[in-house]
Image (spheres, grey):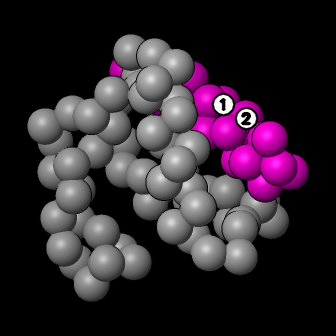
Amino acid sequence: MKDFEKDGYGFLLRYVRKTHGQPFCAEDVTLAAQRVGLAPADLRNWGKLFVQAAKDGYISRCDVPFRRVLGNGTLTLGWVAR
């Protein structure tokens, strides 16, 4: 795994544990990571980390919509820890 992928995946899993089963938005994770200096050159690179975490059984999609800050207010479904 490349450096960002390894560090980002670890950050994502730590974030998920802190949600205690509450739904969260992917942007919450990416913005929190940016605040601590963890960001890929292209924010879309986070997508594959969420897909991997879902495949590994850590998270799944939920039916709670979130308004995207970085997506001009569009709605997206959130994630929840398994």
SS type, badge 2: helix
Q: From what the image shows, is residue 2 above or below residue 59?
A: below
Task: Kindly identify the residue that appears in the image at 28 percent across and 44 percent down.
Answer: 78
Residue at the spot of label 1: 14
Task: Kindly identify the residue that appears in the image at 72 percent across and 66 percent down.
Answer: 39
Residue at the spot of label 2: 10
SS type, badge 1: helix
Q: Amino acid at mark 1?
A: Arg
- Is disc 1 in contact with disc 2, using a CB cutoff of under 8 Å? yes
Q: Residues within 10 Å of mark 2 (few under 14, many from 20)?
A: some
Please indicate whether residue 62 sits to the left or right of residue 15 in the image: left
Task: Kindly identify the residue that appears in the image at 78 percent across and 54 percent down.
Answer: 4
Give whichever of 70, 9 is nearer the camera: 9
Observer-side mark, 1 or 2, equals 2
Query: Residue 71's x, y, as percent?
Result: 31, 78
Is residue 22 among what the camera can see? Answer: no
Q: Amino acid at mark 2?
A: Gly
Write down the quadrant of residue 60 in the picture. Answer: top left
Q: Please identify the residue farthest to the front as the structure is shown.
A: 1
Asked if the magenta segment contains residue 41, the reply would be no
Please indicate whether residue 31 sits to the left or right of residue 25 in the image: right
